[in-house]
Image: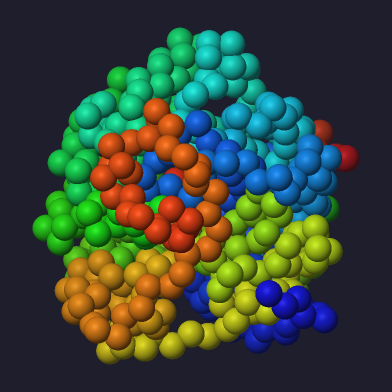
Amino acid sequence: MLGEPWTLSPAVALRPEPFGAMAYHFGNRKLTFLKRMELVQVVRGLADHADVRAALVAAGVPEAQWPGYVDALAGLAAADMIRPRTMEGAVA
Amino acid sequence: MTILESRPETVRPQGGTLIQQFELGLDAPICLTWELTYACNLECAHCLSSSGRRDPRELTTEQCEAVIDELQRMQVFYVNIGGGEPTIRPDFWHLLQYAVDHQVGVKFSTNGVRLNPERARFLASTDYVDVQISLDGATAEVNDYVRGPGSFDTAITALQNLQDAGFEDAKISVVCTRQNIGQLDEFKALADRFGATLRLTRLRPSGRGADVWDELHPLPEQQRELYDWLVANGGDVLTGDSFFHLSAFGGTDGGGALPGLNLCGAGRVVCLIDPIGDVYACPFAIHDNFLAGNLLADGGFQTVWQRSELFAELRSPQTGGACSSCAFFDSCRGGCMAAKFFTGLPLDGPDPECVQGYGESALASPDRVLPPQGQDHSKANPTRNQPVMLTLSRRPGLEDGPAAPPTSACAESPLAGFTP
Ligand code: SF4
Ligand code: SF4
């Protein structure tokens, strides 16, 4: 996943919370919670970076913690909170 | 009901569990119930909001629209609408559409009275609207005893209309009582027949429920039956997270806890907006002690949610009191605040239905004083819709005394549709 381009799903809104954010999916109406500010920053940054690795670097996440973040992102992907970016998306 | 000058600062653990974070409160509720009117065509014996008559101060259409606008700004993506019977407000369908158009999804609770084929087709054509039909017996006999004559047929007709119109996945919402716990399989079969999802919730001694709680609340062995049934069928059934006190039937390690948050969300992730704009900590706590403020008088819902003194208190660390030495405290958390309050038990002690049996001894204490009830919008004169139960249980002098409420929810699970 680290080398892939991803983005927040268009059906999802992020609501800031004191500890991170709540993600709401308008399509399947699922709620999920991002429990750290850094994870919120990574998720928000996905669309602006070439790949997940770049988004992690930009959010200042130390490399040693990347596996934990990748797990969290995989969980979000399974709930369709984030999606792989298509080629057009990557170019834009 | 004081509103603080500014939002209280909270120190939060970095990376704490979600439950810890929820206990300290959120920027906006996850599980918001909004009762649109106190008017109702029925007179259910256990009505949590003591509904019956419209209150002349109820919010106007414009005021309701302003509330929806504010919910949209606060990113409250979902609201549970109830009452009273919300569909008898003439602007109900307009408000439903208005909410959906403003990214506020709606689940509404109804006894079905206005769900004719035409409305059912309208509902089937909307995304983002959920319908929940209240039914408290799998047979007319059991249901109508508490909900009133004809109410079973009304609910079944509504379910049929929804199904015929192609509305998918309606909810059938059941308050579990001594009379209907033996019907759990029948409820499930009924839900399957209509392509609906069954939702079971706990009877709380709120509203008129306080008058009939002694007679209706499940017996200890029925609580066990319910727990076992939920463990066996839990995956397909919603509970509004309302049975967490039963988790103490599981192991002390929390194994056997029912899925859900296992936390009293009142004022933390849950709250109620009542028909006149009063904001309470929980739909089951319509009482001055749990009144946070009024959204018209106190500068809007967000101000009340974020700056009410009451909510700040509910979000501050609580002690478990007599429960904290209990081996099951982590899964049960001392149970439901509203259930304790309306049965006159200390809020930091065991739940009246504590499965360890501590509730019974607490209920037997001579020091117990029942609180006076809050709002009462019950009909002054009984009508032909009055359930048998109410004619039996209404005692002289009680008509305008007690009041607290029950058909909506802790109503909704803060966890509904959410996997931690
Ligand atoms: S119903 Fe009881 S447990 Fe649930 S939020 Fe209200 S007071 Fe708390
Ligand atoms: S003593 Fe308190 S924590 Fe223990 S089971 Fe009873 S209500 Fe729950």
**Residue A25 image point, x, y percent:** 63, 43
Q: Residue shown at 40%/16% (left/top)?
A: B157
- Left or right: residue B274 versus residue B149 is right
The vertical placement of B348 against B37, above or below, is below
The vertical placement of A65 against A79, above or below, is below
- Closest to the observer, B343 or B9: B343
**Residue B316 image point, x, y percent:** 57, 83
**Residue B64 image point, x, y percent:** 76, 43
The vertical placement of B231 against B328, above or below, is above
- Closest to the observer, B249 or B200: B200
Q: Residue shown at 29%/50% (left/top)?
A: B393
Snapshot quadrant of residue B339: bottom left
- Left or right: residue B20 versus residue B306 is left
Q: Residue shown at 19%/37% (left/top)?
A: B183
- Left or right: residue B9 versus residue B14 is right
Q: Which residue lies furthest to the front in this view?
A: B396
- Closest to the observer, B375 or B411: B375
Q: How many labels does the image show?
A: 0
- Closest to the observer, A38 or B377: B377
**Residue B320 image point, x, y percent:** 38, 85
Asked whether residue B330 is in view, the answer is: no
Q: In which quarter of the image is the N terminus of chain B?
A: bottom right
